[in-house]
Image: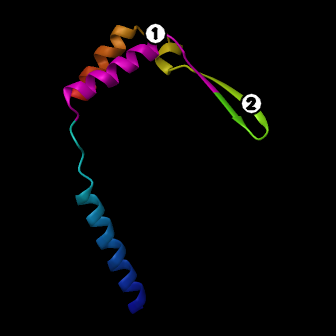
């Protein structure tokens, strides 16, 4: 019983230390601008990635296409940008 109480105290202590030590950091205007510009760009068109590598088994190629939910739903990129700025500036 004493062992269980010790474990409970240690876990509670770690939980409270974690809650107080994890303070959110505010974003600078430049970071907000970069994030929202990226979201606007993603809403405009799909993003493609091409990866080329060589190894002991020969060359490897990998192609990736990423489409944001804003692009798929047909949202206006300017509106996506505006909403992003509002939500991150609050």
Magenta portion: prevailing SS class = helix
Crowding at mark 2 (Cα within 10 Å: few <14, some 14-19, many 20+): few
- Residue at x 46%, y 9% (from the top left corner): 44
Occupied quadrant, residue 43: top left
Q: Which of 34 and 11 is in front in this view?
A: 34
The residue that appears at 23% across and 59% down in the rendered structure is 20
The label nearer to you, 1 versus 2, is 2
Could you say whether the residue bearing mark 2 is in a helix, strand or loop? strand
**Mark number displayed over residue 18:** none
Find residue 1 and report its horizontal and vertical position in percent: 42, 91
- The Cα atoms of the two marked residues, 1 and 2, are separated by 33 Å
Picture colour scheme:
rainbow
39 in magenta: yes
| Left or right, residue 73 beside residue 86 | right
In the rendered structure, does residue 89 fall within the stretch colored magenta?
Answer: no
Question: Picture coordinates of residue 15 (x, y %)?
Answer: 32, 66
For residue 66, side relative to residue 87 (left or right):
right
Residue depicted at x 27% and y 54% = 22
Residue 90 visible to the viewer: no
Numbered circles on residues, count: 2
Above or below, comparing residue 88 to residue 78 in the picture? below
The outermost residue toward the bottom is 2
Which quadrant of the figure has residue 34? top left
Task: State the mark number for residue 44.
Answer: 1
- Residue 30 in the image, given as x and y percentages of width and height: 23, 25
The quarter of the rendered structure image containing the C terminus is top left
Q: What stretch is highlighted in magenta?
A: 27-51
SS at circle 1: helix
Residue 59 numbered tag: 2
């Amino acid at each position: 019983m004493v062992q269980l109480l010790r474990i409970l105290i240690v876990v509670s202590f770690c939980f409270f230390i974690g809650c107080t030590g994890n303070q959110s950091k505010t974003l600078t205007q430049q970071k907000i601008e970069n994030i929202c510009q990226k979201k606007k760009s993603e809403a405009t068109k799909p993003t493609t990635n091409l990866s080329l590598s060589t190894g002991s088994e020969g060359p490897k190629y990998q192609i990736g296409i990423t489409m944001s939910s804003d692009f798929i739903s047909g949202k206006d990129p300017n509106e996506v940008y505006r909403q992003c700025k509002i939500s991150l500036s609050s």
